[in-house]
């Protein structure tokens, strides 16, 4: 097994590039970090190579051997990590292929300009929990492969379909496939409890400040709001998504 | 109006202490920061003094004059801020007095060892939105007056009662007041949808890793879980609280 010690090595430079969107777009790869996420990735076909600190013990090295493994120094670990206290295990993964098909994927979450990586990741995790089939990343939404998104999603991005695209086009595509599309809005909207749970639906949630683009709201089948019973002016977008997704889906 | 320029001033030192729990416990005060939060605080009786950067314009200085106002330099602003890019307006506030009364406050959220400040703040905001009357901070839960908690709560800590205490005692107190107490647990629990919405209830949510203390779960009237329909292992605690609170409360 190869061992790298200097953080100035050319390969370390390549790994560091994956922490930026530009680097990920150029290579088509992204960086995964931490034992839990690597364990999830081991079940997928996405791993290209693994880097592990020479004193790392949480996962047995034997389990990793079907992939190229490089032993790295704590210094390199620090250099390629997006966290301040890296666990010492990393994987370069290829980005997931887009394959959302409205004939099959009938429960969807659409993100319209959502910017906070923690919110995006938490919504992927929530969508997974709620049995949602696909998450569509619309215009102005943060990058799925941002390390903070991946960390907040806690492995759920491996469990559902994801795709980037124009929400205007997606809304039309979903409506053509007989999937009711619900926007979220504070005005000209119905309380979410009025909707009867169904097997197929698409929910659009919007930017933390501006909400869903009005042009998209005009195309939906219905727009929903969550009543505010107290004095707060709004809900966190990930909390709102959780309340709505768990209402819209039929309990099994 | 007094103007302070040097960050080495003794008063700046006192202000900085409010960024730590020890400093807040010693003085009984905490620091509020940013235009939105100060505007919320202006409606309360909690403000002791206001510090504002000499070039700050988002709030008219006339509005602030009923409190002692100190003009501060950008350097001081940086020194007393909990953020990297301070807006330039701060208030020293006195901590809110504890006054939860189960005869009056009939909808409650109990936090059992919740640690992440962002989660705690988001839950205060969500509780406010859901019309919850009080949030009880149990053993091991982070400090309400941590700057990150206050920031995530977006002013909602002014809109409901908060109190720190022993959850074991609170559960007994609430049951004596005929308020049904619901725990959250993955095992020996019922799907939350089985509970009929009511006017009175107390919901306990737990630590991000360990959940609610089993000793507390044994004392509740019923323990609830949120079904996981996909492959994720859990939900973020703030998202879970949102789903449960909006289910438990009666829609108006």
Image (spheres, coloured by chain):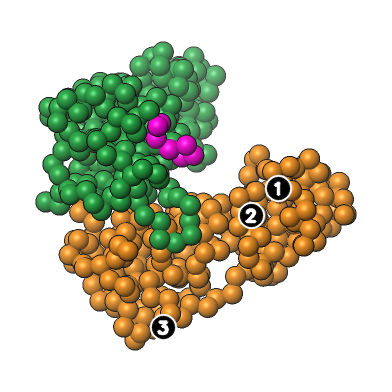
Chain colours: A orange, B green
Image x and y of residue B59, in percent: 30, 39
- Label 1 neighbour load within 10 Å: few <14, some 14-19, many 20+: some
CA distance separating discs 1 and 3: 39 Å
Q: Which residue is drawn at 45% across and 54% down?
A: A122
Image x and y of residue B63, in percent: 24, 34
Q: Which mark is residue A59?
A: 1
Name which of mark 3 and mark 2 comes first in the sequence. Answer: 2
Name which of mark 2 and mark 1 comes first in the sequence. Answer: 2
Q: Which residue is drawn at 15% across and 52% down?
A: B251
Position of A91 compared to B51: left or right? right
Q: Which region is colored magenta?
A: B208-214
At mark 1, the secondary structure is loop
At mark 2, the secondary structure is helix
- The residue pinned by badge 2 equals A39
At mark 3, the secondary structure is loop
- The residue pinned by badge 3 equals A103
Quarter of the image where the N terminus of chain B is located: top left
């Amino acid at each position: 097994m190869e061992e790298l010690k200097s953080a100035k090595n050319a390969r370390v430079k390549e790994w560091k590039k994956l922490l930026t969107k530009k680097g990920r777009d150029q290579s088509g790869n992204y960086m995964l970090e931490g034992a839990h996420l690597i364990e999830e990735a081991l079940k997928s076909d996405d791993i290209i190579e693994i880097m592990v600190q020479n004193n790392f013990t949480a996962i047995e090295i034997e389990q990793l051997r079907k992939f190229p493994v490089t032993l790295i120094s704590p210094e390199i670990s620090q250099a390629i990590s997006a966290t301040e206290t890296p666990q010492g295990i990393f994987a370069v993964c290829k980005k997931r292929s887009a394959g959302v098909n409205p004939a099959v994927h009938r429960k969807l979450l659409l993100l319209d300009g959502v910017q906070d990586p923690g919110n995006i990741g938490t919504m992927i995790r929530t969508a997974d929990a709620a049995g949602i089939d696909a998450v569509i990343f619309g215009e102005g939404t943060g990058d799925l492969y941002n390390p903070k998104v991946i960390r907040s999603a806690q492995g759920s991005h491996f469990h559902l379909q994801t795709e980037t695209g124009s929400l205007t086009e997606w809304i039309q595509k979903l409506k053509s496939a007989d999937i009711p599309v619900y926007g979220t809005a504070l005005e000209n909207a119905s309380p979410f409890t009025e909707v009867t749970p169904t097997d197929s639906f698409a929910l659009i949630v919007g930017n933390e400040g501006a909400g869903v683009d009005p042009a998209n709201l005009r195309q939906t089948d219905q727009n929903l709001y969550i009543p505010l019973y107290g004095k707060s002016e709004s809900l966190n977008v990930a909390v709102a998504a959780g309340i709505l997704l768990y209402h819209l889906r039929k309990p099994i």
